[in-house]
Image (spheres, helix red, strand yellow):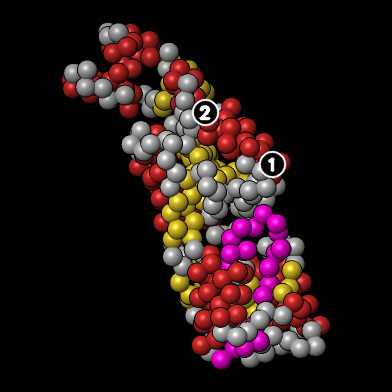
């Protein structure tokens, strides 16, 4: 039996559909169908039920309803880090589309830990979420394959894998854009700052796009100009600044695999008394919020992050509504573009 909560005088009184039915003099099943908007119930009865629910401030107890259905109206969303503002528009899009279709979203962060990711996914399974949108670490996908095999839609965002529906960007193209832009503006001594994390798939393609474009133009990326810092945070960029300052032959332009690294690099360079872009040009990747409001606005590679979340949630809904063949896998590759600002 579906339950409702009525809150009054700072106390919670649990009321069943049977109680509502008794007040209206109808069967509990009639109330249940009326609240669900079923056409099997007359318009007059639906309005009577709705009016009483509104009058008494009733709210459906979704947990109880979901137990009866053996599924929920909740979508799980797992991202890498709440501190990474890249995910803000992605989550906003997921929530916007979910709300339009009557779903709610529960969001968690894995903190780039495969162990934590597995725990979160297991908890979401126990909660019987209807589907999962995830930016995985990709260190292990056995838990995601197990979830998919139960029939639950699993969509990857920002990562790709041949066995899953994926919404990502053309990271290789992004690296090409950076190389071509720097070459066009006369830079020949180009370095990079990367995390070096084994599971960071986008970073690998960004670096590959840059390296191969430089090679096509007769240039190579010197080993000492590849600054590996071990993380994706501003602290890593600060470390890269120290590495750059110690170099005897310094690259005149540096591409950072994400904006957080670029911000830290610029802070470290400026703290040393050097200037951006006079002493070093810097380009990031992601176009996170407020970059154009920095003291030296950061040049970066941008892409439609809101669109990524929108496509992911729409794909989940299509699968839940059985419009898509659950055995078919689709990969959406969105195009990046370069945002030229003062830092380069």
Q: Tell whether 80 sits left or right of 18.
A: right
Q: Which residue has dot 1 on it?
A: 116
Please give the range of residues in magenta: 186-206
Nearer the viewer's eye, disc 2 or disc 1?
Answer: 2
Depth order, front residue of 113/332: 332
Query: What is the number of the mark on residue 150?
Result: 2
Depth order, front residue of 98/323: 323
Question: Would you say residue 188 sits in the magenta stretch?
Answer: yes
Residues at discs 2 and 1 in contact (Cβ within 8 Å) = no
On screen, 334 above or below 328?
Answer: below
Indicate the quadrant containing the C terminus: top left, top right, bottom left or bottom right. Answer: bottom right
Depth order, front residue of 32/249: 249
Choose top left, top right, bottom left or bottom right for residue 277.
bottom right
Residue 102 shows in this picture? no
Residue at 55%, 45% in the rendered image:
134
Between the C-alphas of marks 2 and 1, the distance is 21 Å
Choose top left, top right, bottom left or bottom right for residue 36.
top left
Indicate the quadrant containing the N terminus: top left, top right, bottom left or bottom right. Answer: top left
Query: What is the number of the mark on residue 22?
Result: none
Question: Would you say residue 158 sits in the magenta stretch?
Answer: no
Residue at 73%, 86% in the rendered image:
250
Classed neighbour count for the residue bearing mark 1: other residues with Cα under 10 Å, few (<14), some (14–19), many (≥20): few
Pinpoint residue 106: horizontal percent, then vertical percent.
Answer: 53, 39
Pinpoint residue 117: horizontal percent, then vertical percent.
Answer: 65, 42
Q: Tell whether 96 sits left or right of 85.
A: left
Residue at 44%, 31% in the rendered image:
73
Pinpoint residue 197: horizontal percent, then vertical percent.
Answer: 71, 59
Depth order, front residue of 105/229: 229
Residue at 62%, 32% in the rendered image:
122
Q: Secondary structure at mark 2?
A: loop
Pinpoint residue 105: horizontal percent, then vertical percent.
Answer: 48, 40
Residue 48 shows in this picture? yes
């Amino acid at each position: 039996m579906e339950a409702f909560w009525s809150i009054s005088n700072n106390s919670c009184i649990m009321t069943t559909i049977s109680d509502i039915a008794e007040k209206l003099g109808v069967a509990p099943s009639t109330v249940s169908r009326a609240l669900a908007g079923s056409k099997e119930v007359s318009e007059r009865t639906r309005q009577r039920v709705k009016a009483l629910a509104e009058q008494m401030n009733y709210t459906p107890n979704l947990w109880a309803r979901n137990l009866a259905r053996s599924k929920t109206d909740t979508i799980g969303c797992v991202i890498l880090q709440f501190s990474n503002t890249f995910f803000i528009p992605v989550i906003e899009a997921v929530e916007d589309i979910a709300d339009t279709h009557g779903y709610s979203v529960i969001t968690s962060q894995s903190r780039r830990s495969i162990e934590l990711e597995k725990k979160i996914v297991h908890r979401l399974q126990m909660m019987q979420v209807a589907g999962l949108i995830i930016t995985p670490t990709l260190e292990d996908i056995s838990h995601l394959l197990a979830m998919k095999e139960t029939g639950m839609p699993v969509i990857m965002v920002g990562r790709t894998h041949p066995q899953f529906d994926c919404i990502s960007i053309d990271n290789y193209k992004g690296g090409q854009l950076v190389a071509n832009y720097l070459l066009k503006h006369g830079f020949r001594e180009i370095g990079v700052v990367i995390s070096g994390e084994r599971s960071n798939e986008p970073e690998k393609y960004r670096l590959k796009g840059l390296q191969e474009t430089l090679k096509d133009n007769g240039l190579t990326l010197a080993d000492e100009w590849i600054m590996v810092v071990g993380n994706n945070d501003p602290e890593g960029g600060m470390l890269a600044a120290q590495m750059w300052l110690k170099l005897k032959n310094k690259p005149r332009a540096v591409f950072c695999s994400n904006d957080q690294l670029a911000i830290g690099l610029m802070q470290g360079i400026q703290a040393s008394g050097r200037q951006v872009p006079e002493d070093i040009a810097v380009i990031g990747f992601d176009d996170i919020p407020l970059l154009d409001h920095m003291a030296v606005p950061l040049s970066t590679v941008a892409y439609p992050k809101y669109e990524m979340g929108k496509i992911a949630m729409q794909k989940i809904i299509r699968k839940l509504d059985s419009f898509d063949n659950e055995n078919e896998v689709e990969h959406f590759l969105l195009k990046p573009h370069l945002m030229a600002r003062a830092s380069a």
